[in-house]
Image (cartoon, rainbow, N blue to C red):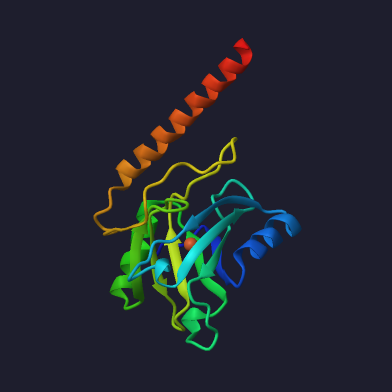
Amino acid sequence: MQSRPIKLGHVGIAVSDIDAAVAFYTKKLGMRLTERFTYPVEKVGHGVHVRAGAFVRCDTTHHNISIFQLTDPDLSKSDKHRLGLHHIAFEFASPQDLLSKFRQFRDGGVTIVNCRVGGPGNHPRFYARDMDGNLLEFYWGIDQIGWNGLPRAYPPITEIDLEAFDFEAFRREFDETEQRMIAQSANIAGVAVSC
Ligand SMILES: [Fe+2]
C-alpha cells in the first residue's frame, strides 16, 4: 500500500521585503514568529538562492509558512528566481511512510533534489520536483513549539542519506531534549515558588 501525507505542513514563499512580510503575517494575520534564520551559501539547497528566512506558525508546529528573502530576486531571470511560491511541504506520520514515498519517487523516476536534516524545524526531509518543476518537500518529525514559545536548539542544515539515516537516534535525541526542557521548567517553577 502506498504511503500518503497526513497533512499539508507548510508552504514556502519568496518575498521582496522579509520584514514587511513578517509584519503582515504576524500583525495583520495574527500568526506567531517562531524564528529567523540566515542561510549559508550552498551549491544545492535553499542557500543557492535564499539569503534569509523567517518562520511563522498558526499552532505548535514550528512553521506553517517559510518566508524567504532571495539572494537575487531579479524578476528578469528564470522562474527559479521569482517571487511567490517557493515550495510546498507535506508531513508524513512515520519515518517508514517517509522512506516509502522516497523509494517510490526515486525508483519511479521522480526528480529527487536532496535529503536533509537540521536547520529551522530540524525535520528529516527530502525535496523533489513535480512534473512542472515545482519544489516539493516531504518530512517527518518537525519540531513543536512548547510553553515558552521557543524552538529547540538544532544542528546546522546537513545533507543526509535518507536510507541510512538513524531515525531511532534522532527520536531519542528529540525525546531527551523534551525531557530536559520539562525538567528546566520544573526547576524554574520551583525557584518561583521558593521566592
Ligand atoms: Fe520547508
**Residue under the image location 48 percent in, 31 percent down:** 181
Find residue 48 and report its horizontal and vertical position in percent.
40, 71
**Residue under the image location 57 percent in, 16 percent down:** 191
Residue 45 lies in what quarter of the image? Answer: bottom left
Find residue 9 and report its horizontal and vertical position in percent.
54, 59
Q: Is residue 11 left or right of residue 24?
A: left
Examine the rendered structure and indicate whether residue 190 appears above or below residue 112: above
Examine the rendered structure and indicate whether residue 166 appears above or below residue 1: above
Residue extending furthest toward the left: 164
**Residue under the image location 58 percent in, 57 percent down:** 64
Residue extending furthest toward the top: 194
> Which residue occupies the foreground of this view, 1 or 149?
149
> Which residue occupies the foreground of this view, 131 or 146?
146
Q: Is residue 112 left or right of residue 132?
A: left
The N terminus is located in which quarter?
bottom left
Examine the rendered structure and indicate whether residue 156 appears above or below residue 72: above
Residue extending furthest toward the bottom: 76
Examine the rendered structure and indicate whether residue 82 appears above or below residue 76: above
**Residue under the image location 35 percent in, 37 percent down:** 172
Q: Is residue 102 left or right of residue 24?
A: left
Find residue 116 and report its horizontal and vertical position in percent.
35, 59
The C terminus is located in which quarter?
top right
Residue 179 lies in what quarter of the image? Answer: top left
